[in-house]
Amino acid sequence: MAKIGKKRKYDDVEKSSGFSLIPDGTYTVKIDKTDYRQNKSKNGSFLEITCIVATGDFKARLIWDYFNLEYPNNKAVEDRAWGDFKALCTACGKRKFPEDTDELKGKTFQVEIGTKESNGQDPRNAILEYIEAGGAALEGKKGKKGKKGKKGKKGKKAAPWT
């Protein structure tokens, strides 16, 4: 159990309404976390990355991206995910797929962030493009402004590219 050090009166605190959207634009981000896990259907796996905006008015805001790297129901979805993953790796300065997604943690690069709506849900931010050092948008990431296992060490599921 964890004790809360600083306390406030419950009635004096306003309920949070959540985060507002980050305005569409180009942002410098840093990869904070990576997680490779099984999908809900338990018939494939995806990579989730968590990025932190590194500079500007929205510094410290989080944005996520997902890559369906093992998706047996739809080869086109899987192929697109691999192209998007390649764009991420290239933006991180890699010219090959990493052995472990931990190799991507801490990498800083630029992204084009936009707003997406799907399935009647509230709008959310999404990474539309990864930008290579020098400012060139990379092919493979979400189609130019549109949304585009084995066991490893320590019992982690190894990435499918190893």
Image: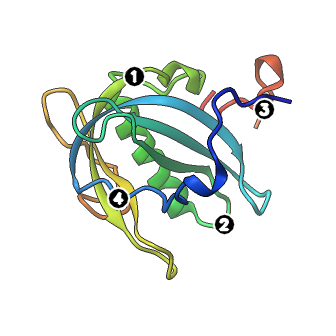
**Nearer to us: label 1 or label 3:** 1
Q: Are the residues tagged 4 and 1 within 8 Å (C-beta)? A: no
The residue under the point 50% across, 39% down is: 50
Report crowding for label 1: few under 14, some 14 to 19, many 20 or more residues within 10 A (C-alpha). some
The residue under the point 76% across, 23% down is: 152
The tag earlier along the polypeptide, 2 or 3, is 2
The residue under the point 47% across, 48% down is: 65
* Quarter the C terminus occupies: top right
**Label disc, if present, on residue 150 of the rendered structure:** 3
Which is nearer the eye, 71 or 57? 57
User: Residue 134's quadrant in the figure?
Assistant: top left
Q: Amino acid at mark 4?
A: Leu
**Nearer to us: label 4 or label 3:** 4
Element under disc 3: loop
Colouring: rainbow
Q: Which residue is mark 1?
A: 107
Q: Position of residue 155 (x, y in %)?
A: 83, 24
The tag earlier along the polypeptide, 4 or 3, is 4
Which is nearer the eye, 50 or 101? 50
Position of 107 relative to 117 (above/below): above
**Nearer to us: label 1 or label 2:** 1
Report crowding for label 3: few under 14, some 14 to 19, many 20 or more residues within 10 A (C-alpha). few
**Label disc, if present, on residue 73 of the rendered structure:** 2
Position of 10 relative to 147 (above/below): above
* Quarter the N terminus occupies: top right
Q: Position of residue 105 (x, y in %)?
A: 49, 23
The tag earlier along the polypeptide, 4 or 1, is 4
Question: Alpha carbon of mark 4 to alpha carbon of mark 1: how far?
Answer: 23 Å
Q: Which residue is mark 4?
A: 21
Element under disc 1: loop
